[in-house]
Amino acid sequence: MPRGRPRSSAAQDAIISATLSVLVESGFAGLTIEAVASRAGVGRPTIYRRWASREDLVVDALATTVPVASTVDTGDLLADIASTVRIAINGLGGSELGGAVVGVLAASAGNPPLAAALAERYLGPRLGVVSELIARGMAAGVLRTDLSPEVIRDLLLGPLVYHWLVTGAPMPESDTEALFTAVLTTLRA
């Protein structure tokens, strides 16, 4: 039997909402447990009972808020891959949270605990959708098999994330279409 008071779902929701607000306003570097607690109207111990670290809090807030893109199945695997990537990127690009997500990804390069938590709980499920489509494309003989699925995935997503990091905005739709045409032409079996 658990000891103490049961955890309040209202407090949990307030903490997640406050985390996202602070993250959008201040970025990962400016996010503190104190700022989140103040915004959520809870004490720091309430947060630390649920999350061991700032990294865990941020990753859980993103993982529970940013949906995993669902796959598209039109019967054309190359078009389905491009469409799924486009849906995922456009979903973030159309959200105020998009820039914060890209900022957290950038911050993970110098923060091993953040990188590990992101890989396991945020990126894993989201990249898994694209990786599954790539594996299907390779098995069907539609995609090259001399490259690993990870390289193919990175060729599709990497330029989009790079553009966002460098410019501070998602790649324009016309450029995204040109990118997919070029990359998928190169990746065809």
Image (cartoon, rainbow, N blue to C red):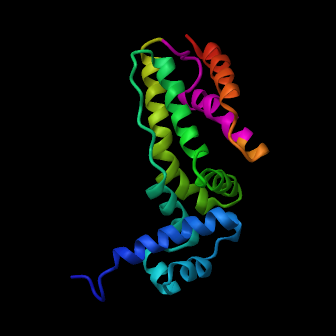
**Within the image, what quadrant is residue 184 found in?**
top right
Image point 51% across, 78% down: which residue? 40
Q: Residue 180, percent across and down?
A: 63, 22
Q: Is residue 183 above or below residue 15?
A: above
**Within the image, what quadrant is residue 144 found in?**
top right
Q: Residue 70, percent across and down?
A: 41, 36
Q: Nearer the viewer, residue 58 or 167?
A: 167
**Is any atom of residue 55 visible in this view?**
no
Image point 50% across, 87% down: which residue? 43
The magenta region covers 142-163
Q: Is residue 145 magenta?
A: yes
Residue 159 as seen in the image, left or right of residue 142: right
Q: Is residue 144 above or below residue 158?
A: above
Q: Quadrant where the N terminus lies?
A: bottom left
Q: Quadrant where the C terminus lies?
A: top right
Q: Is residue 82 above or below residue 157?
A: above
Main secondary structure type of the part rendered in magenta: helix
Q: Residue 90, percent across and down?
A: 57, 38
Q: Nearer the viewer, residue 143 or 146?
A: 143
Image point 52% across, 66% down: which residue? 56
Q: Is residue 144 magenta?
A: yes
Q: Nearer the viewer, residue 63 or 49?
A: 63
Residue 47 as seen in the image, left or right of residue 155: left
